[in-house]
Image (cartoon, rainbow, N blue to C red):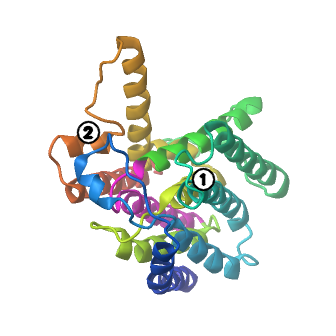
Amino acid sequence: MSKISITAVMLSFCISALAGPILIPFLRKVKCGQTVRDDGPAAHLKKSGTPTMGGILILASVLATSVAFMEDYPRIAPVLILTVGFGLVGLMDDYIKVVCRRSMGLSPWQKLFGQLAVTGIFAWYLVRCTDVSLAMKIPWMPGKYLDFGIWNIPILFFIVLGTANGTNFTDGLDGLAGSVTLMVAVFFSVVSIGTAAGIEPLTCAVAGALMGFLLFNVHPAEVFMGDTGSLALGGFVAGCAYVMQMPLYIAIVGVIYLIEVCSVILQVGYFKLSGGRRILKMAPLHHHFELSGWSETRITALFTIITALMCLLAFRALG
């Protein structure tokens, strides 16, 4: 591991860990408390009032660390555009929910427009300002790429939005989204270093920021990341994958995101088609396990272990 990568991890971790005791009391003071759904697991009702918007810790740590390496690592820029852009969309949504006291936050159409705008800027920058190809590496087929030609951009939008919202759905238990994405960040860091992709200062910064954030977010959580953090992390995962021509690998390392978003789609679809019946006790999937008697820590551990194993599988798929 290079000195730069180690520096990025340590710097980002220190910023996140040291800023936490400052930001959390501030969020509590300005009453940025989470509103818990009445129809959710009963155990979550005691979380009502826990400060949210803690994703600011992650964003600030990553941004401050990445900027320090930007000049020597220009490929950081497009990933940072997607990470910070989605984080700002999430921040606006969180702000409206907890500060303006509008429970729905941004409307679905407003949130979609914001995500489309950020993705559009990312796509433009990637195509016009970098030498990164939109052709995708095919797992288990070294040297082989999948190129959809004129469909590359629409597919990019689909993958980026799907990944970001899958990560958003995963953020429902203490430490879950942070722990799962930490594994993914480590995977991208190792691949970036090994292939000289040039984004390891950013991937390592995310890993460090998440380790610092998890000090305050593991069960019982002192702060939640909110959409500020979960959407930013989704943007990070998609951005890294595209800069390294690895969007197909998201289905492997991000299998938890995929399962979570699919569980919601299946639940809603079946509910409408069957006239009110459900496949799961509650969606996303982690809530189904909760209502089946599993503890939050057990679910988080299981999903994190699955992600770690899938990251190992993805290493094997690189050949």
Q: Position of residue 189 (x, y in %)?
A: 51, 67
> Of the residues shown, which amino acid type is indicated by label 1?
Asp
Judging by the rendered image, the residue that carries numbered circle 2 is 288
Q: Is residue 293 left or right of residue 35?
A: left
Residue located farthest toward the left when viewing the structure as drawn: 293
The residue most toward the front is 101
For residue 272, above or below residue 71: above
For the point 37% across and 74% down, the residue is: 216
Question: Does the magenta portion include 178?
Answer: yes
Helix, strand or loop status at disc 2: helix
Determine contact: label 2, label 1, CB under 8 Å.
no
* First to last magenta residue range: 170-195
Left or right, 126 with reference to 289: right
CA separation, marks 2 and 1? 26 Å
Q: Which secondary structure class fits the magenta region best?
A: helix
Q: Position of residue 290 (x, y in %)?
A: 22, 46
Q: Residues within 10 Å of mark 2 (few under 14, many from 20)?
A: some
Residue that label 1 marks: 93
At label 1, counting other C-alpha atoms closer than 10 Å, the crowd grade (few under 14, some 14-19, many 20 or more) is: many
Can residue 144 be seen?
Answer: no
Near-viewer residue (72 or 239): 239
Label drawn at residue 23: none
